[in-house]
Amino acid sequence: MKKSVLTRYRVMAYVTGVLLVLLTLGVIAKYLLHIDGADGFTTAVGIAHGWLYVVYLVVAFDLGSKAKWPVKKQLWVLLAGTIPTAAFFVERKVSQELQARVAQDAPVVAKA
């Protein structure tokens, strides 16, 4: 597996996670605290998170297929983008698991 596959996943996991945390804060500000301006913020962040979550799904599915994960693990990684802060923890666990595999599959460069 190429390092770029893992890097794409890591970037999208962080982006999705940050947007979901911002969306959660926006919803709290809008509905619980009744802060002016939270409506527009929540709408914008919600739309961004929705579209980027679709990209996250594609990237995470690609990673899971190349890593040959079982279906349960694949579903957990895919759902991590819907639970605030879960994407950060799942990303860390997945990265630690696959770092050695990526290094093992990397081509060996001979020094002259």
Image (cartoon, grey):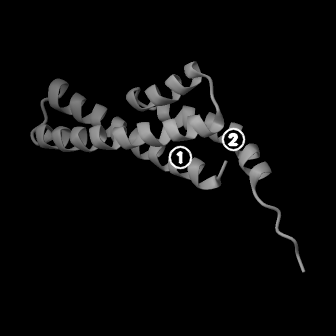
Toward the bottom, the furthest residue is: 112
As helix, strand or loop, the secondary structure at mark 2 comes to: helix
Question: In x, y percent, where is residue 9?
Answer: 52, 45
- Crowdedness of circle 1 by 10 Å Cα count: few (<14), some, many (20+)? many
As helix, strand or loop, the secondary structure at mark 1 comes to: helix
Q: Earlier in the sequence, mark 2 or mark 1?
A: 1
Question: In x, y percent, where is residue 48?
Answer: 26, 44
Question: In x, y percent, where is residue 46?
Answer: 23, 38
- Crowdedness of circle 2 by 10 Å Cα count: few (<14), some, many (20+)? some
Toward the right, the furthest residue is: 112
Residue 7 seen in render = yes
| Amino acid tagged 2 | Leu
In which quadrant of the rendered view does residue 37 lie? top left
- Residue under label 2, please give it: 98
In which quadrant of the rendered view does residue 110 lie? bottom right
- Residue under label 1, please give it: 10
- Disc count in the image? 2
* Rendered image: mark on residue 96: none
- Given residues 8 and 83, the one toward you in this image is 8
Using the numbered discs, state the Cα–Cα distance from disc 2 to disc 1 in whole angstroms: 11 Å
Query: Which residue: 12% across, 42% down?
Result: 40
| Amino acid tagged 1 | Arg
- Given residues 79 and 111, the one toward you in this image is 111
Query: Which residue: 63% across, 34% down?
Result: 93
Q: Would residue 59 be found to the left or right of residue 103 on screen?
A: left
- Given residues 101 and 22, the one toward you in this image is 101
Question: In x, y percent, where is residue 71?
Answer: 56, 21
